[in-house]
Image: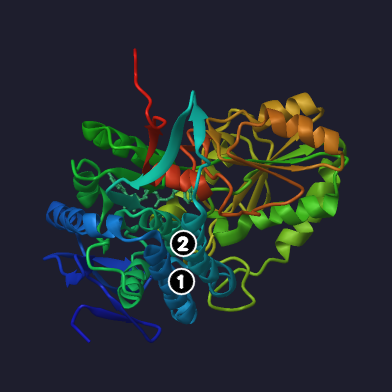
């Protein structure tokens, strides 16, 4: 075990970068702090432009051979990575929980199996990726997906390995090489992924992981002339900086950003279902981009909805995320708590009423909060809080419901609860959102397009949409035998 190894709940994690198939240390480090108790888990290599350049160079060097590797062999290695993840689910789960404070039971049963599935799905999708040839006056059009080159993938802390592998898997499947930059608040499982990929036989340089603060290493990655794709999940301000930086070489971007998604409850809907779905929005301590944080409830059922919501939400158990019985864990960082509480206190000062919560609790916990008496243009209704904070507004008809639902700068997702299929069709057709759920929430299939409208993002990933992004899509037109072009 090297001096750079951190032991997290008995699991050895290398704190250095992974570049060109080797561990590389920076001269400086940054502390990785656990949200569970504020303790320092360890010191992580603090990347700079030097490591960024080295990682891109390694990805560039590894690209020709990986791009030329057959689809079947690439798929085989991706399945082997999935197998490695499946073998280490317990380890990955406890390391991720220690690092970002999300529930251990979710990591074990939901998140980590899905990480493995990300690799299996894109490996299988690659093997059936095809477009039927078509004819133009006797000429054959053949569409192919050519690997694009080195990809820079930058990810946030709220679902670190799930979101990272949602990009890494299709990028690698497509025949690209990767430089992954995980968030500085949750750097650990990306390092374990590098180990797992190497053990699975992924050639050196095909996957590189660089650690560090986005402000220090980000620009060197996103402005690099050898980078062919940038896929980013994170906040709107960072996305704007990345877009500026990528503009130097017109590097194609995929941006998965924030949201302020509505959850519409019509009086004709199943109220118990609506309450269940609403309470679910506190999942991951509210640190979910897709969360339906704006509850829009039809006037006649608003009082009863609120009564049942308070009853259900008050029964949620908040505490140590490693405890099986816990429903809501801590928020990621003292700075995030400050931000959450700032939003709530400004809303209360502006006249909002806290039906539940509205304050911090001990350590890094925030009381699940529901705010009413909020104006449609209030900051708390318009801005993403990224904490366990929901607002409730009422509406009197479908027209007003749609106007309120579409009334922010975001458009990531929307949920509609109604018992009337015709209403569902009318309303969903008018909602501005990348994903709309009717009488359900968070049902996600990797073959579906995923992304946001307006400030929630640029582009779509998932299934063929991922390959469209990570590849240079080429159309080859072949003339029939003996054909002569007479102009
Ligand atoms: P963030 O933008 O602060 O950071 C995200 C990543 O960008 C981190 O790895 C960070 O180091 C890096 N970064 C920071 N500055 C950079 C720069 N100048 N150049 C390059 N990289 C840089 O976001 P966050 O606080 O980590 O994540 C929360 C945000 O992510 C929320 O807005 C949330 O809605 C969003 N999110 C979106 C989705 C989605 O799929 N749409 C999913 C999860 C989270």
CA separation in Å, label 2 and label 1: 10 Å
Left or right of 196 on screen, residue 125: right
Dot 1: within a 10 Å radius of its alpha carbon, few (fewer than 14), some, or many (20 or more) residues?
Answer: many
**Residue drawn where x is 69% and y is 28% of the image:** 430
Q: Position of residue 365 (x, y in %)?
A: 52, 63
Which residue lies under the disc numbered 1? 82
Residue depth check, mark 2 versus mark 1: number of the one nearer the observer: 2
Give the position of the C terminus as an image quadrant.
Answer: top left
Which residue lies under the disc numbered 2? 123
The answer to which of 194 and 11 lies nearer the viewer is 194
Position of residue 105 relative to residue 119, above or below, is below
Q: Position of residue 177 (x, y in %)?
A: 28, 56
Residue 442, by quadrant, is bottom right
The answer to which of 417 and 208 lies nearer the viewer is 208
Identify the element where label 2 is drawn.
Answer: helix
Left or right of 291 on screen, residue 205: left
Q: Is any part of residue 312 visible from this angle?
A: yes
Judged from this view, the residue extending furthest toward the top is 487
Position of residue 77 relative to residue 174, above or below, is below
């Amino acid at each position: 075990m090297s001096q750079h190894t951190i032991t997290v709940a008995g699991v050895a994690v290398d704190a250095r970068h992974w570049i060109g198939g080797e561990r590389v240390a920076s001269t400086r480090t940054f502390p990785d702090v656990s949200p569970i108790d504020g303790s320092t888990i360890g010191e992580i290599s603090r990347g700079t432009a030097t490591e960024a350049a080295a990682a891109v160079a390694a990805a560039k060097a590894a690209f020709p051979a990986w791009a030329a590797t057959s689809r079947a062999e690439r798929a085989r290695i991706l399945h082997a990575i999935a197998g490695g993840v499946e073998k280490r689910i317990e380890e990955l789960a406890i390391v991720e929980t220690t690092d970002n404070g999300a529930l251990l039971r979710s990591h074990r049963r939901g998140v980590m199996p899905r990480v493995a599935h990300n690799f299996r799905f894109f490996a299988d999708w690659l093997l059936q990726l095809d477009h039927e040839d078509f004819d133009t006056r006797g000429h054959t059009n053949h569409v192919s997906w050519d690997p694009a080159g080195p990809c820079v993938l930058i990810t946030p802390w709220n679902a670190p390995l799930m979101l990272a592998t949602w990009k890494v898997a299709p990028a690698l499947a497509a025949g690209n090489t990767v430089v992954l930059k995980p968030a500085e608040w949750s750097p650990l499982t990306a390092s374990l992924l590098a180990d797992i990929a190497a053990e699975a036989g992924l050639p050196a340089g095909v996957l590189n992981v660089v650690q560090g603060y986005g402000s220090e290493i980000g620009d060197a990655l996103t402005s690099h002339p050898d980078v062919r794709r940038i896929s980013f999940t994170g906040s709107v301000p960072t996305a704007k900086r990345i877009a500026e930086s990528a503009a130097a070489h017109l590097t194609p971007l995929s941006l998965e950003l924030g949201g302020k998604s509505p959850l519409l409850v019509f009086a004709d809907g199943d109220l118990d279902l609506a309450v269940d779905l609403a309470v679910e929005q506190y999942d991951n301590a509210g640190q979910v981009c897709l969360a339906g944080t704006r509850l829009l409830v039809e006037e006649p059922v608003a009082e009863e909805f609120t009564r049942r919501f308070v009853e259900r939400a008050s029964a949620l158990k908040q505490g140590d995320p490693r405890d099986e019985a816990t429903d809501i864990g801590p928020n990621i960082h003292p700075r995030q708590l400050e931000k959450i509480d700032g939003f709530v206190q400004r809303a209360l000062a502006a006249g909002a009423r806290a039906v539940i919560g509205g304050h911090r609790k001990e350590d890094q916990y925030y009381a699940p909060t529901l705010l009413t008496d909020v104006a449609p243009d209030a900051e708390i209704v318009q801005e993403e809080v990224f904490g366990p904070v929901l607002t409730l507004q009422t509406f009197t008809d479908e027209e007003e419901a749609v106007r309120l639902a579409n009334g922010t700068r975001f458009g990531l997702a929307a949920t509609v609860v109604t018992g009337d299929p015709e209403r569902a069709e009318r309303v969903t057709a008018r909602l501005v959102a990348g994903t709309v759920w009717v009488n359900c929430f968070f049902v996600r299939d990797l073959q579906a397009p995923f992304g946001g409208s307006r400030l929630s993002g640029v582009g779509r990933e998932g299934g063929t949409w991922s390959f469209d992004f990570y590849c240079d899509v080429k159309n080859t037109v072949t003339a029939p035998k003996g054909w002569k072009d007479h102009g």
